[in-house]
C-alpha cells in the first residue's frame, strides 16, 4: 500500500464558540490528521480579537498581529480546512471579517491588466465543511447552494486554492447522537487522509 503523503494543514474553526458541534468536528479532524502524520495548525476565530472595521487595502497599512499570524499560517499550509456553520445564508460575521482582513490584495490575489486577478495562493488545496439546519434538498433545489458557491468560487478559487472540496453536514437541529457520531467519524476519515 502506498504511503500517504503528509500535508501541512491549516484548520480554521469558523464558529464563534469553542464548545460548538463545529468545534467537535474540527477537533476530531485535527486528532485524526495528527495521528496520520500530518502537521496541523488550528486557528479558532473565537480566540482572535477580530473586529468588523473595514480593512485598509494600502500596501503600507499597519496590520494587526493576528492578521499577520493568520497570513503566515495560510502561506505555510498546503491544505486549508474551514469548518463553519451556515447562519442566515452565510458564514458567521467573525469568519467573514477574517476573510476581509486576511485575504488582501498583494497577499491572496493581485489585479493586473486582465479581467481576472493573479491568484497568489496557488499550489494549495482546500476543504470547506459546513454545518446547517437547512435540509439538503431545500438547500440544493430551492436555494441553489449559494454559500457553497461563494466559498468555492468567490473566495477560495479566487485566491488560487484548487481543488476545493465541500461537505455539508446537517440538519444539525434535532440530529441524533448516532448521526453526530457518523459525522465525527467522517471528519476523522478526512483528517487521516489530509482532505
Image: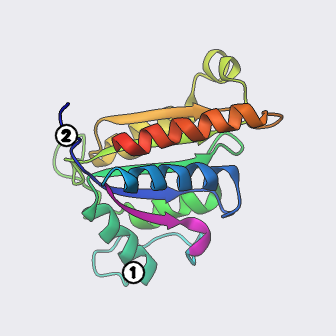
Q: Can residue 93 be seen in this view?
A: yes
Left or right: 114, with 176 as reference point: left
| Crowd around label 1: few <14 · some 14–19 · many ≥20 (10 Å) | few
Q: Is residue 91 visible?
A: no
> In x, y percent, where is residue 94?
60, 63
Extreme-front residue of the structure:
1
Residue 40 part of the magenta segment: yes
> In x, y percent, where is residue 189?
45, 37
In primary-sequence order, the first of circles 1 and 2 is 2
Q: In which quarter of the image is the N terminus?
A: top left
Highlighted magenta segment, given as a residue range: 38-47
> In x, y percent, where is residue 85?
64, 46
Disc ID at residue 3:
2
Alpha-carbon distance for marks 1 and 2? Answer: 40 Å
Q: What residue is drawn where x is 36% and y is 36%? A: 164
Looking at the picture, does residue 125 appear above or below residue 14? above
Left or right: 110, with 169 as reference point: left
Residue 154 part of the magenta segment: no
SS label for mark 2: loop
Q: What residue is drawn where x is 63% and y is 57%? A: 15
Look at mark 1 in the image and give the residue it sits on: 63
Amino acid at each position: 500500500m502506498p504511503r500517504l503523503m503528509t500535508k501541512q494543514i491549516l484548520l480554521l474553526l469558523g464558529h464563534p464558540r469553542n464548545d460548538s458541534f463545529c468545534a467537535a468536528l474540527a477537533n476530531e479532524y485535527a486528532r485524526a490528521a495528527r495521528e496520520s502524520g500530518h502537521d496541523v495548525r488550528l486557528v479558532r476565530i473565537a480566540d482572535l480579537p477580530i473586529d468588523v472595521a473595514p480593512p485598509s487595502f494600502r500596501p503600507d497599512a499597519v496590520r494587526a498581529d493576528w492578521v499577520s499570524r493568520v497570513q503566515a499560517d495560510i502561506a505555510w499550509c498546503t491544505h486549508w480546512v474551514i469548518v463553519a456553520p451556515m447562519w442566515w445564508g452565510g458564514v458567521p460575521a467573525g469568519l467573514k471579517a477574517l476573510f476581509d482582513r486576511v485575504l488582501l490584495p498583494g497577499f491572496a490575489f493581485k489585479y493586473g491588466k486582465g479581467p481576472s486577478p493573479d491568484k497568489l495562493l496557488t499550489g494549495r488545496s482546500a476543504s470547506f465543511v459546513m454545518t446547517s439546519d437547512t435540509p439538503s434538498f431545500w438547500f440544493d433545489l430551492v436555494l441553489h447552494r449559494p454559500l457553497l458557491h461563494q466559498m468555492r468560487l468567490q473566495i477560495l478559487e479566487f485566491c488560487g486554492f484548487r481543488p476545493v472540496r465541500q461537505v455539508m453536514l446537517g440538519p444539525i437541529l434535532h440530529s441524533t447522537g448516532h448521526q453526530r457520531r457518523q459525522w465525527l467519524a467522517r471528519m476523522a476519515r478526512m483528517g487521516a487522509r489530509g482532505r
